[in-house]
Amino acid sequence: MCGDELPGGLATPADYADFAVRLVEQGYRAIKLHTWMPPVAGAPSVALDIAACTAVREAVGPDVELMLDANHWYSRTEALRLGRALQELGFYWLEEPMEEASVSSYRWLAEQLEIPVIGPETSWGKNFTRAEWAASGACDILRTGTTDVGGLTPAVRTLHLAEAFNLDCEVHGNGSGNLALLGAATNARWYERGLLHPLVDFDLLPPHLNSAVDPIDGRGVVVFPERPGLGDDFDLDYIKSHTVEVS
């Protein structure tokens, strides 16, 4: 989750470092940071972002892959400064440091950085917009996901589009649909299991599920479900008893 001002949360670079160590101990092989943004005092801050990323790298060592989602707050020069710092820290990718409306800004950034720039996430236009990003060199890794591009069909089209450009295409977010996309892809490497936070029990099941679709073991492995459809294990009795309206 994003940085905050909560005691025991993600209020300082040291909080990020401590939580990252806990995640690695649970089996996570990679960690993507979301740093501070308004209304947190002083945010956004390139210096504070760099401090958090540095603290996490020092805490987990060189063998855990790290990424940063910078929440789209920065100018070109700020994004360049941030990207160059992440290169020195050996980060795997830089995500959304600027508003994604300007494709030329992302092309400018990608041309100057060695660290891969990933995108777009929030740009309207499904696979068509992502084709423009790939063709213009605005990213080094393409983005897709069931909620990003409007469902499974345009998400699969985006995966194939990226493959045609010899690009990795990372699936954004968790859930059964995105897990299925990974199973159908050869150019996607990471499953983003969830927005994790020290004060949130991510593995606590909501009442409409019998079990999670994506349990993780101590080795960092998520096994694909073998149930019908996308594999969700719904508690149909609970859903029926809490149905408000049927159309």
Image: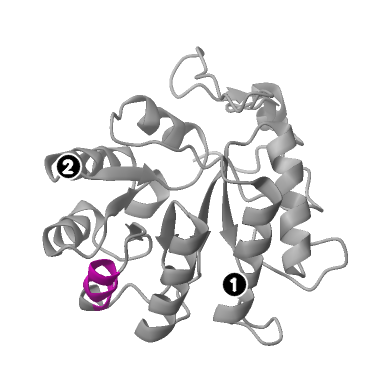
| Residue picked out by circle 1 | 49
Specify the quadrant that holds the N terminus. bottom right
Residue 111, image x and y in percent?
Answer: 22, 69
Helix, strand or loop: magenta stretch: helix
**Residue farthest toward the right in the current orientation of the protein:** 7
Which label's residue is closer to the chain start, 2 or 1?
1
When asked about the image quadrant of residue 210, the answer is top right
* Looking at the image, residue 234 lies above or below residue 20: above
Does residue 151 appear to the left or right of 157 in the view shown?
Answer: right
- At 52% from the left and 42% from the top, the residue drawn is 192
Residue 132, image x and y in percent?
Answer: 15, 62
Does residue 6 appear to the left or right of 16 in the view shown?
Answer: right
Residue 108 highlighted magenta (yes or no): yes
| Residue picked out by circle 2 | 166
Query: In the rendered structure, which amino acid carries the disc numbered 1?
Result: Asp
Q: Label 2: how many residues lie within 10 Å, few (<14), some (14-19) or many (20+)?
A: few
- At 60% from the left and 28% from the top, the residue drawn is 220
